[in-house]
Image: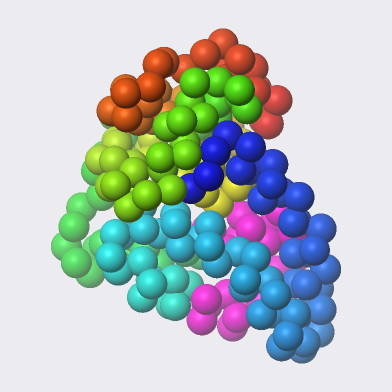
């Protein structure tokens, strides 16, 4: 999954992504491929956290819908990242319903997300999240915390964008991500979330 700087690195590509999407909307297939290559890794990681081994199939369904409805999209690269995450989430929830797996109910509906500071002790936890083991740990979190962590760390969305995907308030998403990362850090043997982490999360509201 990368480390605490990952969302910033992801967002650095949003200018290229926005340009590629605009060209793709005009029928440029190569530009659509560029957009796919930029978005797919994070989207697939997010889906793995939701549906596990079925992520590839769900991602394929999501991209079919993304391609079909591309002309309706309005926005920049960051907006496209959020739009595709919303579509992928809907397809994942449909998949879970078909599998008769009821998503875990959130422990607190007020929760949502937070990210650690670039030099906090959570760097180690986030580095470890690049493994399948870490994704399994994320899936074990309460669902609101898991989705908050995945959207912020893996997909690279800022707080407001993640909140729109989840249909919650940014403050609730920050809280859920903070709690999710704190729990992951404990499981991975890393110290608790630092004050610096809280400040960094506040910067991306």
State whether residue 138 appears in this view: yes
Is residue 31 left or right of 39 when viewed as pictured?
Answer: right
The count of marks equals 0
Residue 195 horizontal/vertical position (percent): 56, 11
Q: Is residue 84 magenta?
A: yes
In the rendered image, the quadrant that contains the C terminus is top right
Residue 170 horizontal/vertical position (percent): 58, 32
The residue sitting at the top extreme is 195
Task: Please report the bounds of the magenta region as a residue range.
Answer: 63-86
Is residue 178 left or right of 108 when viewed as pictured?
Answer: right
The part of the image, by quadrant, that contains residue 105 is top left
Looking at this view, is 140 or 130 the one in front?
130
The part of the image, by quadrant, that contains residue 38 is bottom right
Residue 178 horizontal/vertical position (percent): 47, 25
Is 147 above or below relative to 116? below
Is residue 168 left or right of 75 when viewed as pictured?
Answer: left
Q: Is residue 37 magenta?
A: no
Secondary structure, magenta segment, majority class:
helix
Q: Residue at x 69, y 41 (%)?
A: 8
Q: How is the image coloured?
A: rainbow
Q: Residue at x 30, y 68 (%)?
A: 54
Is residue 16 left or right of 152 when viewed as pictured?
Answer: right
């Amino acid at each position: 999954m990368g480390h605490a700087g990952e969302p910033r690195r992801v967002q650095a590509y949003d200018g290229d992504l926005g340009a590629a999407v605009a060209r793709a909307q005009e029928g440029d297939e190569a530009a659509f491929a560029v957009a796919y290559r930029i978005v797919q890794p994070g989207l697939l990681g997010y889906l793995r956290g939701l549906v596990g081994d079925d992520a590839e199939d769900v991602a394929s369904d999501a991209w079919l819908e993304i391609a079909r409805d591309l002309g309706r999209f309005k926005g920049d690269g960051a907006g496209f990242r959020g739009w595709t995450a919303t579509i992928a989430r809907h397809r994942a929830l449909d998949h879970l319903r078909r599998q008769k797996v009821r998503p875990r109910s959130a422990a607190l509906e007020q929760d949502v997300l937070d990210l650690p500071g670039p030099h906090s002790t959570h760097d180690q936890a986030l580095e470890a999240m690049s493994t399948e083991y870490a994704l399994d740990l994320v899936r074990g979190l309460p669902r609101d915390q898991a989705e908050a962590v995945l959207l912020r760390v893996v997909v690279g969305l800022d707080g407001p964008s993640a909140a729109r995907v989840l249909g919650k308030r940014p403050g609730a998403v920050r809280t859920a991500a903070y709690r999710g990362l704190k729990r992951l850090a404990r499981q991975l043997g890393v110290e608790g979330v630092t004050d610096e982490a809280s400040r960094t999360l506040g910067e991306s509201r």
